[in-house]
Image: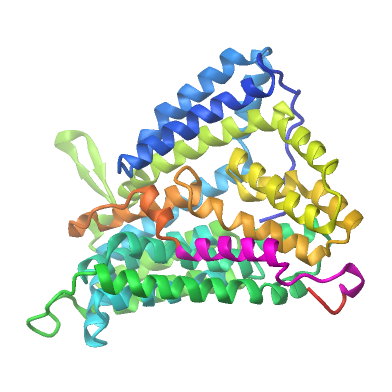
Amino acid sequence: MKLEEKQEKLAPIEFYGGAYGALLPFLIFVTGVITIALSGAPDERGFWPVLILALGLGLVLCKDRTAFSEAVISGMSQKIVMIMITAWILASIIGILMTLTGFVEALIWISEHLQLSGSGFIIATFIICCIVSLSTGSSFATILICSPLLYPTGGILGAHLPALAGAIIGGATFGDFIAPISDTTIASALSQDAEIGATIKSRLKYVFPAALFALVCYTVVAYNNSIEVKINEPGSLGSPRGIPMLLVPVFIIYLFLKGKHLLHGLLFGLLFGTILGLVLGLLPLTEIISLDLENFAAKSFVIDGINRAVGLSIFTILLMGLVATLKASGLMNKLVDFAATRAKTDKDAEGWIVTVMSMAVLLTTHSIVAILMVTDFTKKTGERLGVSKIRRANLLSLIACVFPFVLPYFIPVILMANMTNTGQEYNIPQVSPLDVGLYNFMSWGLLLMTLITLLFRWGSTKMTKEKNGY
């Protein structure tokens, strides 16, 4: 994914009530989403009315309703929105394909023969997802690839479901922070003119303590809450027939490692998996397409996959439209200008960089957009007060890998909660966005490292030592 995208130049938007008028729709949105999440409802379709209400309120409060409407449409039609939606649709279809061809049963069979319990499976899930996210550089791809395979398997083995979902998104967070091809890594480093290789090396001191913290937490929660499934007969909980389907995610990950586009990797993976399932006799032709003439309907695992992705896709379209109105209001630019006049020392500068970045992430609900919005402020303030470019990049990434992965109204959390519906076929309940975020111990570990970094100057170096330090 490129660091920047060409976007249509939008006219500035003014609201009745000034900054309060611009923020009120977001306050309605956040309040509504948190209320729904706290109720335990995991379906993002429940967020649609809240977003429509927020957009309607914004339209009422906006002085130029035509400019507001254009901003909303521009935000909805961004290239990144279409990339995400297409990826979710294809990955959802792949998830159903893997279920139909017996891959989940194969994972259960392997876990049984390795004597891997539900609690042990949670720990293994976190490690596997760390490896996948480090390989692909994409938290979205990791969640989309791993969830349909690992969540149903762990659920059947008796794993604690919130911790299992948290382990998947936690492993996805790991790669988002440190993978060389992660868009967060690239955006944070290049925005501060830092070398990506040196930046990644410097992040080891942050990511390893956070990962160790997460691993300890998952171990404690898993063994205290998982229900150990007693197996009466070997092989009673699974079948090895679907093991060859392991080639599908391996092939997709290989394409990502070769630098192929997200659409390229997922679409080729889907085609490869379909052909492989047909050749092995694991996928009946009727699952690809069949006609119900009496009800004037068509049936297909492709249709089922698309239906599964509809809720999240509509949520994303509406949310990105709302975010665009905040950007057009110029509120973030005012916040950046305010912070620039308050920073007096290097420690002040680091605190303001974290504060402004946090505000940008919380208001835009998009880590890359937030990084791009605070790029100039972070660079100028850091250079003026002696904060090294690598340290500035690390501060941006730390915040980008905390809030979007723990708060229930951010897309990664909503995506992970949505993907837990892959266990429905096995009567495994979904996990709410609130629980997903609470059990993402990797992000909580990174938040802890952020506080240690600010309070105790962890990893701090002077700009004069930039070539040798981090």
Horizontal and vertical percent position of residue 145: 43, 64
Identified at 63% across, 60% down, the residue is: 398
Residue 375: x and y, percent?
A: 78, 49
Residue 464 drawn in magenta: yes
Quarter occupied by residue 323: top right
Can residue 362 be seen at all in this image of the molecule?
Answer: yes
Count of all numbered marks drawn on residues in the image: 0
Locate the N terminus and report the quarter of the image it occupies: bottom right
The single residue placed furthest to the left in the displayed view is: 232
Asked if 123 appears above or below 382 in the picture, the reply is: below
Instruction: Say left or right for 385 vs 470.
Output: right
- The residue at the point 26 percent across, 87 percent down is 114
Q: Give the left or right position of residue 409, taking residue 82 as reference.
A: left
The dominant secondary structure in magenta is helix
Q: Which quarter of the picture shows residue 167?
A: bottom left
Q: Residue at x 37, y 77 (%)?
A: 124
- Residue at image position (69%, 67%) is 456
In the image, 252 versus 419, the foreground residue is 419
Q: Which of the 4 image quadrants contains residue 122?
A: bottom left
Q: How is the image coloured?
A: rainbow
Quadrant containing the C terminus is bottom right
| Residue 242: % across, % down | 27, 75
Q: Tell me if residue 177 is in the magenta stretch.
A: no
Compared across the picture, whether 414 is left or right of 17 comes to left
> Quick one: 352 or 249, which is closer to the camera?
352
Q: Does 293 sit left or right of 252 as displayed?
A: left
- For the record, the magenta segment spans 441-466
Q: Position of residue 258 (x, y in %)?
A: 62, 72
In this view of the protein, which residue sits in the foreground, 151 or 255?
Answer: 151
Is residue 282 in view from this perspective?
no
Question: Is residue 330 shown above or below 119?
Answer: above
